[in-house]
């Protein structure tokens, strides 16, 4: 053994340390991006709370106006929401300041999500084989787009319906609904972020199919089981309102069907690549 060469364990230790150092800088850059977005949200207090956070608590919210138009077109005036049956209150001395800071941080994470995933992808990408890098092109773009679509669906559809159902549900007319600010914002953010991550299903299936862990045949066989799971997920992230559960369930089922097609395309590509390698090996032999 050449004494001038480091031992194998030292090489692995240096390699591990180098990876930790690279990961540290990725985390630092991602954290800086989140902090910058959070600061921008913090100093945009009027827009953040009056227009964005408290939008679903007012009757002039976009979703409610669209429901009214749909009610006029369908001759169903019950769809029109012209009154909000609750009042948002703050019951703690530092409640508004604390909520301002925490909400700004959440918005920073949401706005910085594409960059966060990009930094994660930059850390993972050097460890992939060339064909894996080629097959995963556009991953950051599609993950970000699906996240944004799911977030908008949750904010404009799922969250307003949940808020309206829970706010107008009464056990006795003499009891007024006075919502705590933290409870309202928690419901809004939970609904919106849940839908954002659920909408990542096609990309999850894409990577699992690339790894050979899932096939379109398996997804077809377990379609009924998946629908049951989807119904359970919809019941968890929505209030016990049938209409809200149906509205949330339909897009998720469509995403599942889209994922089956994605898995089929990936499976065909894997099969074609495998046949090409076998033919190449036979030709060399």
Image (cartoon, helix red, strand yellow):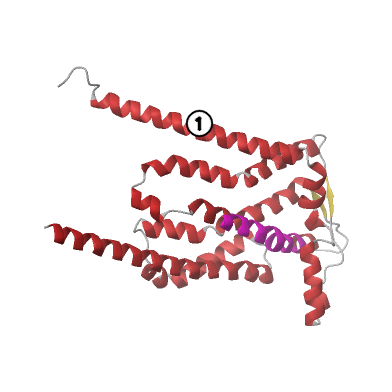
**What percent of the width, then of the height, locates residue 149?**
62, 59
Q: Which residue is mark 1?
A: 25
Tell me the residue at 73%/49% (across/down). Answer: 185
Classify residue 141 as left or right of residue 191: left
153 drawn magenta = yes
Q: Is residue 50 left or right of residue 122?
A: right
Whole-percent x, y for residue 84 in the image:
85, 61
- The x, y position of residue 123, in whole percent, is 45, 39
Give the magenta-colored segment's residue range: 145-165
Q: Which element type, helix, strand or loop, lies under badge 1? A: helix
Quarter that holds the N terminus: top left
Mark 1 neighbour density, 10 Å: few (under 14) some (14–19) many (20 or more): few
Residue 170: tell me if it is visible: no
Which residue is painted at 43% across and 59% down in the image? 206
Q: Main secondary structure of the magenta part?
A: helix
Q: Look at the image and tell me whether residue 22 can be seen.
A: yes
Could you tell me which residue is drawn at 78 percent across and 57 percent down? 56
| Count of numbered marks | 1
Displayed quadrant of residue 272:
bottom left
Q: Picture coordinates of residue 227 (x, y %)?
A: 51, 70
Corner quadrant of residue 105: top right
Task: Confirm whether the magenta stretch covers residue 74.
Answer: no
**Residue plotted at (67% across, 58% down):** 152
């Amino acid at each position: 053994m050449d004494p001038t060469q480091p031992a194998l364990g030292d090489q692995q230790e240096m390699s591990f340390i180098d990876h930790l150092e690279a990961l540290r800088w990725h985390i630092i850059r991602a954290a800086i991006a989140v902090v910058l977005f959070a600061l921008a949200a913090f100093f945009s207090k009027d827009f953040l709370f009056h227009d964005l956070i408290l939008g679903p608590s007012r009757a002039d919210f976009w979703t409610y106006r669209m429901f009214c138009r749909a009610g006029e077109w369908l001759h169903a005036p019950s769809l029109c929401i012209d009154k909000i049956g609750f009042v948002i209150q703050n019951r703690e001395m530092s409640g508004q300041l604390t909520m301002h800071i925490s909400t700004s941080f959440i918005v920073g994470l949401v706005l910085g999500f594409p960059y966060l995933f990009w930094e994660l992808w930059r850390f993972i990408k050097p460890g992939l084989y060339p064909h894996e890098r080629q097959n995963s092109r556009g991953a950051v773009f599609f993950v970000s787009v699906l996240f944004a679509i799911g977030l908008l669906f949750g904010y404009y559809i799922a969250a307003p319906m949940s808020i309206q159902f829970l706010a107008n549900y009464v056990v006795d007319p003499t009891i007024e609904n006075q919502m705590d600010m933290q409870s309202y914002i928690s419901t809004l953010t939970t609904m919106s972020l849940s839908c954002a991550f659920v909408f990542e299903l096609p990309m999850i299936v894409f990577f699992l199919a690339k790894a050979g862990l899932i096939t379109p045949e398996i997804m077809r066989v377990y379609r009924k089981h998946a629908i049951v799971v989807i119904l359970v997920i919809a019941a968890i992230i929505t209030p016990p309102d049938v209409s809200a559960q149906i509205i949330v369930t339909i897009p998720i089922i469509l995403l599942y069907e889209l994922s089956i097609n994605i898995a089929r395309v990936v499976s065909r590509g894997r099969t074609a690549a495998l046949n090409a390698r076998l033919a190449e090996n036979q030709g060399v032999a």
